[in-house]
Every structure is written in structure tokens, then in C-alpha cells.
Image (spheres, helix red, strand yellow):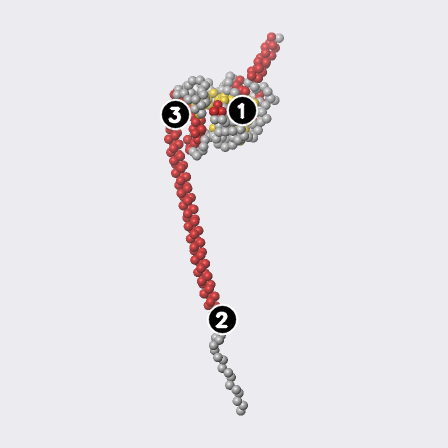
Amino acid sequence: MFMKISKIFIMLLVVSMLASCGLVEGDGRHLQPLSSTIKGQMRNIGSSPSEAMLIRLFKEESILEVWKRKANGTYKLLKSYEICTWSGTLGPKFKEGDRQAPEGFYTVTPGLMNPKSSYYLSFNTGFPNKFDRAHGRTGSDLMVHGDCSSRGCYAMTDEQIGEIYALGRDAFRGGQRSFQLQLYPFRMSVKNLARHRNSPHMDFWRNIKIGYDAFEISKTVPNWDVCEGRYIFNAAGGKLNAHGACPTQSSKPELMAQVMQKQVKDLAEYEVLVAGYDADEADKLALAEKRAAEKIASAERTAALNEAVSQQTQGVTNAVGGFFEGLFGGGQKTSTPTNIITPTPMPRIER
């Protein structure tokens, strides 16, 4: 009897824990276990289902990455998924109804997991976050979901979102209170930034690139906040005022020093690439203008030649016509002079 009571108590405790994470509603699809394949992949990188996770998405490449924490605290890429479709263009979301998928840094908590989604399964990105609100941006229900259909969201296949959802669910069960969601326009390389140098979103992209570089260098989750209307990463101190002054101290000074060194190096490379791209464009423009001028000149020469040939042909035609008219009695007729006196015939003499 004691054993039965203990089993019932454990079952109720598990249900209670899942309910506190908002993971027991729905028809059971949210409770599907992870496959042995994905579990094996986690073992291969030194992680497990209960370890913390992080997600990065790249619009231009249409890639969603799931990273898992290892025993030493650093993260390693577990799996990349091809995004089925996403809404809008490169750049952040600004207002409700613009059908633009957001960009930036977001925090996904258990309460943002949706087991009853009409798009199979989903989790909310957390838009608008502190940065978005500081800039007056609006929008709601911006999700990563299944069904491969998007109106402002990131859409995966049902099979993909089922696995991604389960990875998040098991990480929450393992004690992770939230996972970071990093949403990028593209992989934040210098070359990609230079390609998009004329975008009005460049300042924003350079800002979130700092967080991107912090993760790339350390493979640890960068803490983010907002001050002076921009993202700040690994800042020292407590919660910041979104429009207040940014602190000068960092919670990870050595890492952020490396990040700043990379920023300086990347900026120099960016300027070289941009100068090259601009020079190439100037050369292409000059070449196009030269070719256009050559075509115009050629057309004018052709027109002038055609006119000259036409005039010569007309002259020859007139000359030949006059020759044949003269030869065969054609041409202009002459009139009989009116002052010529016609002689009167002499009378006939009879012999």
C-alpha cells in the first residue's frame, strides 16, 4: 500500500511540475519523447536532454540552430534546421500588422510554450521585448511554430517544431528557467554586412552583432539588457533603464575586451570591402554609361549613313529615269510656238 501511495504521489508531483511550466494542456503532442537519434547526438557533443539550450535563427540563410550546454558550461551546436518560411524582409519588426518577423535578442520562458497551438506546436518569441518597447514597436503572438505557414512568424515543419519543442521542454524540466532566442537577418560576418551596407537597419545590426560576437568567441550565453535605447551585453550591475545611461563596467571584462578588439578589426575590414564594392559599382556604372553612349553614337551614325544612302539612291533613280524617258520619248513635252506663220498653199494651175 505504501508503495502504491508513493507511486501516485510521484505521478501527481510530475504532473504538478509540468503544469507549472504550462506543458500539460493540449492533446499530448507536446509530450512526445525525443528520439534516440537526437539523444545520441547530444551524447556525442557531451550534453543531455536536461542541459540548457539556446536557439539562433538566420533569415537570409533560412536556418534555425539549436545549441546545447556541455558539462564545462560552454555551448555546442546540436542541430541545424532549415526554416520552412518566414515573413517580411531583412530587418526588425516595427508595428502590428506589418507581417515582419522580428530580429534581436529574446527570452523564452516556459509560459511562452504553447502546446495548444493551431500551428501544431509553437513557442512565443517574447516580442516586444525591452528594446522593442523602448522604441515604441508593437506586435503580438510572434511565434516559432509548425504548419509551414507564416504571417509575421518563423514557420517550421510539424516534425521539426515537434523536436525543437521537446528540446525546450526537456531543458525546462532539467532546471533551465528560460532559453535565449537570438534572431538575426543573416550570419553577422563582415562580408554580409558589407553586402547590405546601404540598408537603413545597419546601426541596429551593428548593435546586435556585439552579442553575436560575444557568443561566437566564448560559446557562452551573453546577458543582454537595454540602455540609451540600444542593446548592451554582459553589463555589470542590476536592471537598467532602457533610456538611461549605460554602465561603463562589464560583468565579463576580458570577454568584452576581446569583442571590442574584434569590432575594431571588423570595422577596418568592412571599410575596405565597402570601398571595393563602391569602386566596383562605380566602374560598372561608368562601363554601363560608356556602352550606352557607344550605342547612341552607333545609332546616330547608322541613321546618318541611311540618310546619305537614301539621298544617293534618290539621285540615281532620278538620273536613270530621265535617261530612259529621253530614250523612249518620254519626259517633258514641248509646246508649239505661237508666233510661227504657217504658209498658205499656192493655187493649183490647170494645164
- Three-letter amino acid code of the residue under disc 3: Met
Label whose residue precedes the other's in the sequence (1 or 3): 1
Which residue position is annotated with label 3?
260
Residue 333: image tag: 2
In the rendered image, which quarter is residue 217 located in?
top left
- Three-letter amino acid code of the residue under disc 2: Lys
Secondary structure beneath label 3: helix
Q: Nearer the viewer, mark 2 or mark 3?
A: 2
Q: Nearer the viewer, mark 2 or mark 1?
A: 2
| Tag count | 3
Label whose residue precedes the other's in the sequence (2 or 1): 1
Is 172 placed left or right of 285 in the picture? right
Name the one closer to the observer, 323 or 35.
323
Residue 31 appears in view: yes
Spatial CA span between label 2 and label 3: 102 Å
- Picture coordinates of residue 334 (x, y %)? 48, 72
Task: Give the position of the N terminus as an image quadrant.
Answer: top right
- Picture coordinates of residue 171 (x, y %)? 52, 19
In the rendered image, which quarter is residue 218 located in?
top left
Name the one closer to the observer, 161 or 140.
140
